[in-house]
Amino acid sequence: MNITLPTLEWLMTWQEPLLRTGQVILIVLLAWMFQRILTRGITRLGNRYPQLPAELLMPLRGLLRWLILGSAFMLVLERLGVSAQVLWTALTGFAAVAAVAFFAIWSVLSNMFCALLIFAMGPFRIGDCVEVLESADKPGVRGRVVAINLFYTTLEDLSGDAPGAWVQIPNSLFFQKAVRRWRNGELPTPRNTEV
């Protein structure tokens, strides 16, 4: 088999890109196979041990999938000439900024998420009387729900301390404390509350 000079020149010119392309394809295939093997193993583990909750196995599968895909992406970028040190510096810098930003707005996001839960689950509605209890032996804020928005639920104070005043309670508080509820906005008379 004779290799001519133009063929040899072509092979020398394209050797590096072809080699990198082959390595990238190999990384992607190995990551895909590894991810499939792990998710099948987790599924079989769940089938073999039914006492393992599906609520645990599904996020585990997703976490492993994203971990493998992220690692494969980093390896592919490294094979394409991006420095691993630059990648890790960028990744950790982004993670630090994201953590600081999340910490700064976590209470806002918590109240917004709890508002969505209030709208979706309907633990109370506008017009209901609710009481947010401080503890089992202490009365809390009691009032008639007059408005629910993304951050606060507004109650018309019925506790007797300031009748007619409005109290704004952060939505997340309804999921952190015990809440009593009376439908149709009617509070029980004092003799009905005695045990």
Image (cartoon, rainbow, N blue to C red):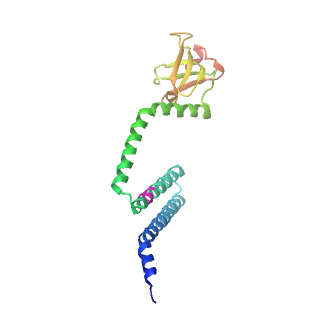
**Residue bounds of the magenta highlight:** 70-74
Q: Is residue 74 above or below residue 98?
A: below
Q: Residue at x 52, y 17 (%)?
A: 167
Task: Classify the position of the C terminus by image quarter.
Answer: top right
Nearest the eye: 80 or 72: 80
Q: Residue at x 61, y 34 (%)?
A: 120
Q: Is residue 111 above or below residue 94?
A: above
Q: Residue at x 37, y 48 (%)?
A: 90
Q: Is residue 182 left or right of residue 1?
A: right
The x and y percentages for residue 34 are: 47, 64
Q: Is residue 52 above or below residue 177?
A: below
- Classify residue 163 by image quadrant: top right
Q: Is residue 52 above or below residue 157?
A: below
The x and y percentages for residue 184 are: 66, 21
From the image, give the main secondary structure of the stretch colored magenta: helix
Would residue 45 be counted in the magenta stretch?
Answer: no
Q: Residue at x 53, y 10 (%)?
A: 160
The x and y percentages for residue 15 are: 42, 73
The x and y percentages for residue 1 are: 46, 90
